[in-house]
Image (spheres, grey):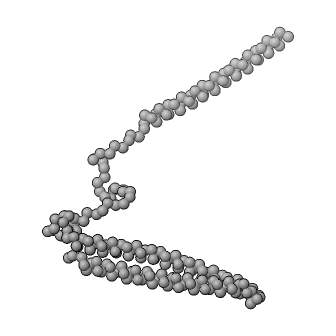
Amino acid sequence: MRIAKWGLAILLASLVGTADGQQQTQEQAENSIAAAARRARENKKEHAKPTKVWDNDNIPTSAASLSVVGKAPPADNSANQPANVPPGSAAPGAANSASADASKKSAVEADLAAAKERLQTLQNDLDIAQRKITLDRQVYYSKPDYAADKAGAATLEDEQSQLEAKRQEVADAKKRVADLEEKLNSAGQSGTSSAPK
């Protein structure tokens, strides 16, 4: 029985020894992983990208390489003045009429852009209305007893009147665009003829 006790004691000691050894190897592995992560962080800090320092030597000077956010600064008009007139002392009447013509022209251009956008919207609406009435007619006339469907006939008549109204709106919008284009062309011609040469 003594042998059995000693055998059991040796077995337990070997199991405790292996468990202890496994625990030590696991701790060593965890320590080595943590140490490797620490070393990687330290290396990353050492090799950090230096910050960019801007000075007169490395600032871009050409307009093509600069990126500006926001409205552009006003253009220098001193190049447009005659040679015998000092900068800032242009004739007041000429400057006022030129700026008035320019503002009038820009207002007409803005109106024209809005009118063209409205015309495009109306044309899209007209196209949709035409397609809808075509489909509704096909559905209405495909019924064997379509003549007895008074509600369907009334709906088609209503859609037809709406379609005619949209056609009239498109025609009015086209006329407005043509009028504004003519006004813009005449403002452009009068602006060039009244400008000093």
Quarter in which the N terminus is drawn = top right
In this rendering, the answer to whether 188 lies above or below 2 is: below
- The residue drawn where x is 33% and y is 72% is 103
Residue 194, given in percent of the width and then of the height, sits at 25, 78
Report the front residue among 62 and 122.
Answer: 122
- The residue drawn where x is 63% and y is 80% is 132
Farthest residue, direction top: 2
In this rendering, the answer to whether 156 lies above or below 63 is: below
Hey, which quadrant is residue 143 in on the image? bottom right
Using residue 157 as the reference point, say whether residue 68 is left or right of it.
Answer: left
Farthest residue, direction bottom: 147
Farthest residue, direction right: 1
Quarter in which the C terminus is drawn = bottom left
Using residue 66 as the reference point, say whether residue 83 is left or right of it.
Answer: left
The answer to whether residue 134 shows anywhere in this view is no
Residue 22, given in percent of the width and then of the height, sits at 67, 24
The answer to whether residue 9 shows anywhere in this view is yes
Residue 57, given in percent of the width and then of the height, sits at 27, 47
- The residue drawn where x is 19% and y is 70% is 91
Using residue 89 as the reference point, say whether residue 122 is left or right of it.
Answer: right
- The residue drawn where x is 46% and y is 83% is 174
Using residue 187 as the reference point, say whether residue 13 is left or right of it.
Answer: right
